[in-house]
């Protein structure tokens, strides 16, 4: 895993490269929680409920990425009253939001993310792969 951290005007960003392993989702959850719990000058901080929501979103997106596209890149950005989560994968298929059903055993992750996020975007990138972006209010 490699990390890169940048600070810009009124925003802070970090990126992680995560391996194609089942443990990557849990690792991404922990990294997200630590990053969002850090104190930031001039802000009141992010409360535990919003950190938990962001960690759940990251967990779902990284699980999908590693399951369908191998290793992935996670990018987190805090800017003003928003947290932006981006997960990049190498999957040839495009993620689809499926309707929630009582009997479904899988495929609910993106639907949950859509419920928690103000905005959810899925874009094809380059010569293959996807960028899934979720923007959450804090």
Image: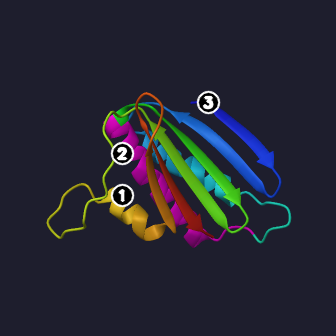
Q: Residue at x 32, y 39 (%)?
A: 67
Q: Where on the picture, by quarter, is residue 112?
A: bottom left
In the rendered structure, does residue 60 fall within the stretch colored magenta?
Answer: yes
- Relative to 48, does residue 9 appear above or below in the rendering? above
Q: CA distance from mark 2 to mark 3?
A: 20 Å
Q: Are marks 1 and 3 in contact (CB under 8 Å)?
A: no
User: Which is more N-terminal, label 1 or label 2?
Assistant: 2
Coordinates of residue 63 in the picture (x, y in percent): 38, 45
Would you name the residue on which mark 3 appears? 2
Percent position of residue 13, x then y = 70, 47
Q: Which residue is mark 1?
A: 110
Most distant residue in the left direction: 103
Q: Residues within 10 Å of mark 3 (few under 14, many from 20)?
A: few
Q: Quadrant of the C terminus?
A: bottom right
Depth check: 55 or 6 in front?
A: 6
**Residues shaded magenta:** 45-68
**Magenta stretch: dominant secondary structure:** helix
Rounded to the nearest angstrom, the CA distance separating label 1 from label 3 is: 26 Å
Q: Nearer the observer, disc 1 or disc 3?
A: 1
């Amino acid at each position: 895993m490699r990390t890169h951290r940048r600070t810009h005007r009124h925003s802070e960003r970090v990126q992680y490269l995560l391996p194609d392993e089942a443990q990557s989702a849990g690792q991404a959850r922990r990294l997200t929680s630590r990053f969002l719990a850090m104190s930031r000058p001039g802000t009141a901080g992010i409360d535990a409920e919003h950190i938990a929501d962001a960690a759940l979103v990251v967990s779902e997106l990284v699980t999908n990425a590693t399951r369908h596209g191998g290793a992935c890149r996670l990018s987190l950005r805090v800017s003003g009253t928003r947290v932006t989560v981006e997960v990049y994968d190498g999957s040839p298929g495009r993620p689809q939001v499926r309707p929630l059903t009582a009997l479904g055993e899988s495929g609910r992750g993106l639907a949950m993310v859509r419920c928690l996020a103000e905005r959810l975007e899925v874009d094809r990138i380059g010569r293959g792969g996807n960028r899934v972006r979720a923007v959450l209010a804090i």
